[in-house]
């Protein structure tokens, strides 16, 4: 298995943490803060990325870890989809959308790469 001292050492987890903090800050003000459904959904999706990376790290095999990374990847795409809605409704500035969208795309690439690596190294 890839060697990490803890899930906090995983680059995709670090980036997911930063995105989640940014999403929480952007959704706590203005119209976004009053759209409870979208606000809560995008927050849950971003937290899910971090949580699944951490949970997968704690599993017993590389295969299980890779499966959780795939779930995290799905959550990153879910968050990207919610960003489109927020942009369309005028809740986000284009710059914030672009920054978050690109960060989520990078997280998706990182989790996919790590999952592929782990599947090639089945033992933990």
Image (cartoon, helix red, strand yellow):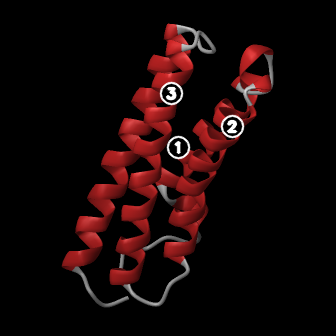
Tell which tag, 2 or 3, sits nearer the viewer.
2
**Residue at 36%, 63% in the rendered image:** 70
Task: Answer with left or right where residue 75 lies relative to residue 66.
Answer: right
Choose the circle earlier in sequence order: 2 or 1: 1
Label 2 vs label 3: CA separation? 13 Å
Q: Secondary structure at mark 1?
A: helix
Q: Quadrant of the N terminus?
A: bottom left
Q: Secondary structure at mark 2?
A: helix
Q: Position of residue 96 (x, y in %)?
A: 55, 16
* The image quarter in which residue 5 lies: bottom right
Label 2 vs label 1: CA separation? 24 Å
**Residue at 44%, 38% in the rendered image:** 104
Q: Are marks 2 and 3 in contact (CB under 8 Å)?
A: no
Q: Which residue is mark 2?
A: 37
Q: Which residue is mark 3?
A: 83
Q: Which residue is mark 1?
A: 15
Residue 24, above or below 10: above
Choose the circle earlier in sequence order: 2 or 3: 2
Task: Answer with left or right where residue 108 lies relative to residue 39.
Answer: left
**Residue at 29%, 57% in the rendered image:** 112
């Amino acid at each position: 298995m890839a060697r990490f001292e803890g899930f906090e050492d995983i680059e995709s987890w670090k980036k997911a943490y930063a995105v989640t903090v940014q999403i929480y800050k952007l959704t706590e003000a203005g119209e976004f803060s009053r759209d409870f459904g979208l606000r809560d959904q995008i927050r849950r999706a971003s937290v899910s990325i971090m949580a699944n990376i951490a949970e997968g790290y704690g599993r017993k095999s590389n295969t299980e870890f890779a499966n959780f990374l795939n779930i995290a990847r799905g959550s990153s795409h879910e968050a990207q989809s919610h960003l489109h809605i927020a942009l369309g409704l005028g809740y986000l500035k284009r710059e914030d959308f672009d920054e978050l969208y690109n960060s989520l795309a990078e997280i998706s690439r990182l989790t996919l790469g790590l999952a592929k690596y782990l599947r090639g190294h089945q033992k933990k």
